[in-house]
Structures are given as structure tokens and as C-alpha cells.
Amino acid sequence: MGASDPKDTAGQARLYEMYKTFFDKAEQERRWNPVRDVPYDKINKDAPESLVVVAETFCCVESFLPDYVAGGINIVRPFFGQAWFSANWAYEESKHSVALMEYLLRSGRRTPEQMFDLQSKLMETKWELPFGTAREMTIYGCFQEMATFVIYVKQELGAKQYGDECLAAIFRLNARDEIAHCRFYEDVVKVLLEEDRPGTLRDIAHVAKHFQMPGVGIVPDYDERIKVMREEGKVDRSVFLQKVFFPVLKYLDVTRQELQEASSRERAALNEDRRESRNDERRTRAAE
Amino acid sequence: MASSRAELLSMFQKTASEITEREFPPISEGTVISELGIDSLGMLEIVGSMERELKVQLPDEALAGIQTVRDLIELVEKKQAFPPTANAS
């Protein structure tokens, strides 16, 4: 039915129109070149190591791009608009890691050997899709892209404070892409809500409950790195609710109460399944 | 009828266990919610469940500031003391 059915031409045409609008806007307003458009001459080579760690941590998370692309594009493969969006998304994200890597190298704070050692260490672990359906992953995209946008914006202020105009520019360019990605995902979720509100609400509740940023568990020294990022970006736990969770819900026109009801229904269904399976076990044992 | 602080504390302890399916050591008002291993979205679920039970609705913008169980209890108390009126403009 609709956009969630690959065979529904009207639904797929709608997604394609959304992608075309997104792509056209990106071509008109957002294209940039990580080699030529970043002011590498404005690097502050004396910036504190903590700022470099922030850049390196973003670079680490962006480095799992091959896994994000492989997992992400295959799950939306039957949906033309979303699959083509994923291809464009990958191109845009690839620029983020190139810009960050160039920053780390040109600042002289990391050597090519250190960067390639790090890349090779990162690739020893594989990022796995956190959710199993296209709809869940699209919802995940809303929260993840918005969170990344917010963190880049916060870190841009930090980079400016340390007089690193180059890193501030990279964070700004990356943030602008992230919010555009977030809007695309949100617009798709709005369509999915129109077509199946209870099911989509259930998935939003499920994704929110199990949400984790993509670097968790795969980036080396993640906890220490996040501690530095929180301190440098002045990001505390309240930021996620204030700047990510509630704004996404507001854009989707979903209330917290609706999600909580969906969540309670899911928990009740899960408890019912458990009860059933315990009863089945008892019956089996009694029959033996 | 407004609940006492002790009742709210006990409700938090019970709801947190139900939602997270974990048993917690005795929780005090000063307990930092994140130190229980409950993230911000988990906390929202607990808040939602308490709201339903208490028949109050806490404002979204206030929830982001909750760090400790005391913060939540005080928010609920405030809401119970000054419920929104039907014709409030």
C-alpha cells in the first residue's frame, strides 16, 4: 500500500518526486568540494588536542561509510526514490570524511601512517544495520541525522572559539548536509504516517526505544572520545531531547503521548507473546 | 488527590523496573537517573507511564531538564498543585 509497497506506482512516484526535489535543491544550493572549498589555510595548528580528537572522532564515525551504504541501500533497494537518495547520501557523506581527513593531515596533527592505521583498525569491525525494515531505518535516519547535525553545529562553535576557521567551516558544511538528509527522511516518514499511522507510530516508538548513535561499540575508545566531545561541544544529555527528539516529533506532527501509547501496546503484545509461549511450554511438558 | 513525595518516589521505582525489566537497588530522590543506566528516551517512557497513572501531563520542554528523581518529583508536584484550567488562555 502506498509508498511502503514497491509495486504501488503512485506511492513510488511520490517518493521519486521527493527525491527529485531533494536532489535539485542539493545541486542548486549545497554542492561543495572538500578539496577546493575548505579554507585549509585557516587551520589553527595550535588548537588543543581535544579539538583534534573531536575532528578525528567524526572522521572515525564517517569512516564506516562502506557499511552504511551497503546496509542502507539494500534495505531500500525496492523503493526507487529512496534507493537513489541513498546513492546521493553516500556521495555527500563521503565528502565529510575526506574533509575531516584532510584537516587532520594538513594540520600536521596526524600523519598519513596514523590515519591509515586508524582506518585499517576501524575496518576490523563492521557496522550492522540497527533495524530490520526500510521504515524503521528511515525513522532511524531522522533521529541520527538530526543528532549529527546538532553535534556538528555545537562543535562548530567550539572550533570558532579556538580560532580554527577551517574546522569550523568543515563542521558547518557537514551540518548543512546532515540537516538536508534529516528533512528528506522526515518527509518520507510523514508520507508513511499518512498511509499507516498506527504501524508507523509503533515503529517510531520502537526505534526511539532502541536508538543508538552509529559509532557506539565500533569506534575505538568511543566512551573517552564522547566524553571529550561532550565537554568541547557543551553537549549534555538534555540536548538529545531538546534539540533532536522533540524537534523531529514536532516536524512529523507526532506527540510524545501517541508514541507512549504505541510503546505500551508493543510491551503488552510482547508480554502476551511471552505468556503464550510459557503456556505452550507447560502444555508440552504436561503432554510428555 | 495529590500524591506525596514518598508515593511518587515509590511509583518511580516501580515504573522504572517495569519499563526496563530490571530490578534497582532502593532509589532515593537524589539518584541521578542516568546513573541507573536509564537513557533520556527510557526516562521519557517512565515519565509517560507515571503521567497516565497520575492523570497529569508534564510539558515536553521541562522534561529535558530532568537529571535526578527529585527533579521529576518536583515537576509532578508543581503540576498537581497548579493543574491547567479548562478555560485558561
Image (cartoon, grey):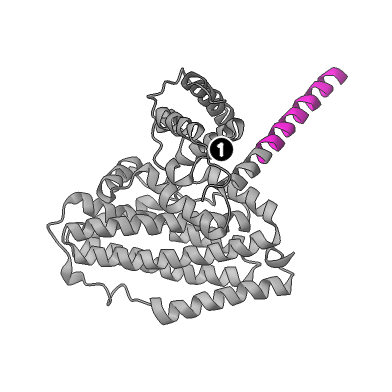
Quadrant including the C terminus of chain A: top right
**Is the magenta region chiefly helix, strand or loop?**
helix
**Residue located 61% across and 60% down the image:** A75
Q: With A96 as the anchor, is A232 left or right in this view? A: left
Q: From where the camera sits, is residue A207 visible?
A: yes
**Rendered location of residue A170, percent (x, y):** 29, 66
**Residue located 53% across and 24% down the image:** B3
Q: With A184 as the anchor, is A65 left or right in this view? A: left
Residue A235, placed above or below residue A40 = above
Residue B82, placed above or below residue A95 = above
Q: Would you name the residue on which mark 1 appears?
A: B48
Question: A123 or A165, which lies in front?
Answer: A165
The residue at the far left in this view is A46
Question: A156 or A58, which lies in front?
Answer: A156
Question: A222 or B45, which lies in front?
Answer: B45
**Rendered location of residue A1, percent (x, y):** 75, 64
Residue B49, placed above or below residue B10 = below
- The residue range painted magenta reads A266-288
The residue at the far right in this view is A287
Report the chain holding disc 1: B
Q: Amino acid at mark 1?
A: Gly
Instruction: Check disc 1 and report its element: helix, strand or loop.
Output: helix
Residue B1, placed above or below residue A41 = above
Q: With A263 as the anchor, is A245 left or right in this view? A: left
Q: From where the camera sits, is residue A217 visible?
A: no
Q: Quadrant of residue A101?
A: bottom left
**Residue located 36% across and 64% down the image:** A175
Q: With A26 as the anchor, is A60 left or right in this view? A: left
Any magenta on residue A287?
yes
Mark 1 packing: few (<14 Cα in 10 Å), some, or many (20+)?
many
